[in-house]
Amino acid sequence: MSFDMESSYIAKKYEDEIYRKWEKSSAFKAVIDRKKKSFTVAMPPPNATGVLHLGHAVMLAIEDIMIRHARMQGRSALWIPGTDHAAIATQSVVERNLEEKGIKNPRETLGREKLLKEIRGFAENSKDVIRNQIRKMGASCDWSREKYTLDDDLNLAVNTLFERMFKDGLIYRGGRIVNWDPKMQTTVADDEVEYVEEKAKFYYFQYGPVVIGTARPETKLLDKVIVVNPKDKRYKHMVGKEFEFEWIEGKIKTKVIADPCVDMSLGTGAMTITPAHSLVDFELAQKYKLDSPQIIDFDGKIRKEVSKNFGGMTIEEARGKIVETLRNKGLVKKIDENYVHNLAVSYRGKGIIEPQVMKQWFVDVNKKVISWKGKKLSIKEVLQDTVKSGMIKIVPKKFEKIYFHWIDNLRDWCISRQIWWGHQIPVWYKVNKKQYDEFNKRGGSTSTLLNILNVDGEVRYGTSSPKGQYWLRDPDTLDTWFSAALWTFSTLGWPKKTEDLKYFHPTAILETGYDILFFWVARMILATTYALRSDKVPEAKCIPFKTVYLHGLIRDRHGKKMSKSNPETCIDPLDMIDKYSADALRLSLVIGSTPGNDMRLYEEKIAGYRNFINKIWNASRFALINVESKDFKEEFSAAKIKNTADKWILTGLGRLIKSVEKDFENHRYSDAGMKIYDFLWSQYCDWYLEISKGADKNPDVLIYVLQNLLKLLHPFVPFVTEKIWEFFGKENLLIGQSFPQENKKFNFAKEYKNFELIKEIILQLRSAKSEARVEPGKKIDVIIYAGKHLKNITKNANVISRLARLSSLKVDKHGEKITQAKSIFVGDIEIYIPLKNLLNPDKEKKSLNEEINSKRKFIHSLEQKLKNQSFLKNAPKEVVNQQKERLKLELTNLKRLSNRLKYLV
RNA sequence: GGGCGCUUAGCUCAGUUGGUUAGAGCAUCUCGUUUACACCGAGAGGGUCGAGGGUUCGAAUCCCCCAGCGCCCACCA
């Protein structure tokens, strides 16, 4: 064994080298082995837009723990890495960069092909950056199976699924109200709309016979219908009648209808509707077969066709002007300046959402076409069943409720986006010559144009043009979550029937942040159940994963979201790796975090775990210094263990392993990590190594426990443990070792208990102003120097009598006859008690009195309890006996305390 | 408006089916440095477990109510 361990662990020096070693060893590569069970995790693909942030770091840390643990358990563990093209996010970043470079309106200036080339270059570049960052975290993923959502084979998967859903009528083109982002010029899904509270003006206008309230006067240009509640007495007489009166641009005719959806208590109880720019109004208009004229165009301006005076104006301009017009006509009744409402903004682009009626592509969530457990079910129903029936478990459970609630409110999913970066929709429209020419003349960039041209003819699926003239391919792309939804099986080769797919799917667990439960997790269930289900494939094989583990978000020390705009609290994982090691960062992200709960992170926390990493290093260093290479045996029998301390640490290790294994089963990674942390630091180092210093060491046990601890720690802190493993001069890497199992032969319950008692005694003696010392070269394991006048140290009366019981030490009934140095044996451990260091009698008296008082109180309450009939009747016997014994003990303690007090006086 | 959480030491958080006198890390203070480690060791102080009520022999834990904070969903004409 070569020995060149520095006195502290230098992560920077080793981490990259160790990662290369793992990669070279093909330890990450998952092999199909029918004798083994598979364990698959599909890595949530980071967006190919830039840099790794803490959200990725926490995901990588937890998943790597799962994977390394499974691998060490002997399962064929596959972790599929990859990246996501992140349609809107990426395109908007690239467009912004180009604009900063001075290229105005990049879509028009560059055109489709050139812009896509720009984006592709950008994405390739960030993919490289991300790959390296994933390596920096120590992620043991199978790089040979790396995927990208725009790879050819994943493209094929997307198109295949689209085709099938299209033919099943699950994907349809429909004119419905969608969330339109005028800034990015695209639709976004319902889930991608965020609401931001905003203070705005709320206007009350005289609208013919009624007063209406609105925050958006500009949408009222063409309102022609008044809606009231049928029960509303104020308006009952008007229902069904028509009115003619002066409005924004001259006289208009208006009809009054009644519908129960109107809230009488809200505003004036009367409203007008704008079907083209409000979901509720749109649904009402459909119910009563009303027109839904478009008022605001796709650029967010008033349409010229709609208004002579306001056409072409932006919303803000028009709003002011319209209110002015109405004021001049005397129709403004009141303006509420402090109206607070929620402004809908796009989750990605932060553009203000304008609802628009458009023909777009949707996934029907209510059509019953999936064969599921003997019935034809809808997407919604299958989504519900997978979780309700327990096929898929969500950790923590509270998210199951949130999931069901989401399904209840789920509407058809709009999957078409009017951007270019992504999977182009594989459908073609039959148009006439005029439409064809016009489309091409005007650039044909998005389906917005198809809407303007009113394309409404035959539609065919295909990735190449159907035969015949005048076919136009839909220029739009699919929602990025559509391809992401296929991630677990498209990465394994679907639609081809690959061996990988058969062996590694369904994946064991999906680990991700709870913030994308709906965006992604639910949609994966949606896509997988539909895509994989057939008569030959049973339901249980048609789920993407068996468990969903949702981690919390990382927040700064004040509980706020970390954002790059605040560099003071924003932590860059790479900085932290550089400063404190990847291992320390990993621990800080895992320990103290419970699934589904947000966690606060700050630098001191990471520094704390860096200290622990160093502790592992030094404990190993100490052990290795003390043991020559051929000095220990890896296998030994229980009979060879003689020392109490050895028996104690081995038993403790067994218990630790058992408990850690249980924690892994229950996804309690934080608990598992904390237990190993505590065992290594507070038991192995603070007790076992200290004790071994003065004694004849048993190198077998010393090394055995250390090696087991390294194995236990490896999933959490792979780098440092692997590096230390090298010093054992083994051929095989630690990553490929098997995870420790409890060795039942090394279970010495009696000695374990004894040693725990010794620890307690020593602690009590220590707290009595004493010192723990180890004397080299002596036979004894522990020497305790207790304070002088031990007889006056009240706390230890009990200790002394317990010591007496355990040893041959003679004390009188009050335990106060120890007046000089003594050494006693507890088992094979000798405790040496010289008396020195005088304590302050006054102080002692005071604290003694306090203690006696609190003891009295406690004894009183115990006595009350033991007199209580219902306690005696109902409490379990063991508890009663326990309490009785305790009372006895406390009474003797009280006696001793009182005696001690007398003695002092 | 509907739903879901959270509130435990100065700070960050554990506390598994109710069961000894409620725990850890950091921070603070005191002492120490011996065969690994100052990124160290030993010790101390610090909590009416958000408020109130209930169930129970026994509640941080279960139930009710109140307060504060947060999240999700819906919607705001």
Image (cartoon, rainbow, N blue to C red):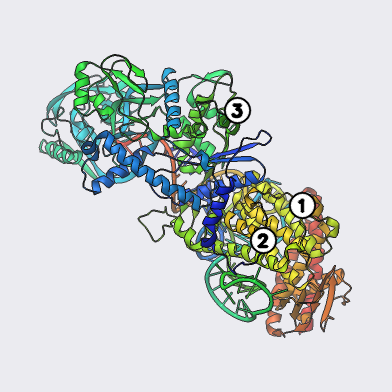
Question: Which chain contains the residue that carries disc 2?
Answer: A
Q: Which kind of residue does numbered mark 2 sit on?
A: Leu
Q: Which of B73 and A95 is in front in this view?
A: A95
Q: Which kind of residue does numbered mark 1 sit on?
A: Phe
Mark 2 burial class by Cα count in 10 Å: few <14, some 14-19, many 20+: many
Q: In which quarter of the image is residue A269?
A: top left
Q: Nearer the viewer, residue A812 or A432?
A: A432
Question: Which chain contains the residue that carries disc 3?
Answer: A
Q: Nearer the viewer, residue A563 or B57?
A: A563
Label 2 – label 1 distance at C-alpha = 41 Å
| Coordinates of residue A3 in the picture (x, y in percent) | 65, 66
The numbered mark at residue A540 is 3
Mark 3 burial class by Cα count in 10 Å: few <14, some 14-19, many 20+: some
Q: Are marks 1 and 3 on the same chain?
A: yes
- A697 shown above or below A185: below
Q: Mark 3 or mark 2, which has the lower sequence index?
A: 3
Mark 1 residue element: helix
| Coordinates of residue A645 in the picture (x, y in percent) | 78, 64
The numbered mark at residue A680 is 2
Judged by depth in the image, the label closer to the viewer, 2 or 1, is: 2
Instruction: Say which residue label 1 marks.
Output: A871
Q: Which kind of residue does numbered mark 3 sit on?
A: Ala
The numbered mark at residue A487 is none
Q: Can residue A769 be seen in this view?
A: yes
Q: Is residue A346 visible?
A: no
